[in-house]
Image (cartoon, grey):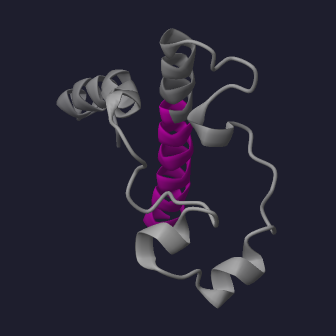
Amino acid sequence: MFKSYPNLWLVLGTFIILSPLGLLATGTAFGEWGLDELPGEIGFVPAGLEKFAEIWTLSPLPDYGIPGMDATFIQSAGGYILSAIVGVVLVIGIVSLLYKVVKD
């Protein structure tokens, strides 16, 4: 399924390598606001979000970084790249699994 798209892998790899460019931007990423930032961005905190905000507290790569390795730009960039790789691997795994289920 994935072997017939060599250009896809080239583009995807380029996006993974370029993912740390977000570190150079000022402000916060759209839609990635915490409960403390929401009132300033949209004017209120939705009740459902406030109610369920603490359900998921464990994150293997919090803030797209490796815990304890975010002191320099290079360390932060490594975290972003690792987060992108983990995300791509998870998406490919899920798509492959769904492809096999639907194909059979």
The magenta stretch spans residue 81 = no
Query: Image quadrant for the N terminus?
Result: top left
**In the rendered image of this protein, does residue 78 appear above or below residue 100?**
above
Q: Nearer the viewer, residue 29 or 98?
A: 29
Point out the stretch of residues depicted in magenta: 84-104
Residue 61 figure quarter: top right
Q: Nearer the viewer, residue 68 or 45?
A: 45
In percent of width and height, residue 91 lies at: 49, 48
Left-right relation of 103 to 11: right
- Principal secondary structure, stretch drawn in magenta: helix
In percent of width and height, residue 52 lies at: 75, 77
Left-right relation of 6 to 96: left
Residue that appears at 53% across and 82% down: 44
Left-right relation of 84 to 46: left
In percent of width and height, residue 81 lies at: 48, 24
Of all residues shown, which one is farthest toward the bottom?
47
Q: Nearer the viewer, residue 100 or 89?
A: 89
Residue 42 figure quarter: bottom left
Residue that appears at 52% across and 60% down: 33
In percent of width and height, residue 75 lies at: 57, 13
Q: Nearer the viewer, residue 92 or 104?
A: 92
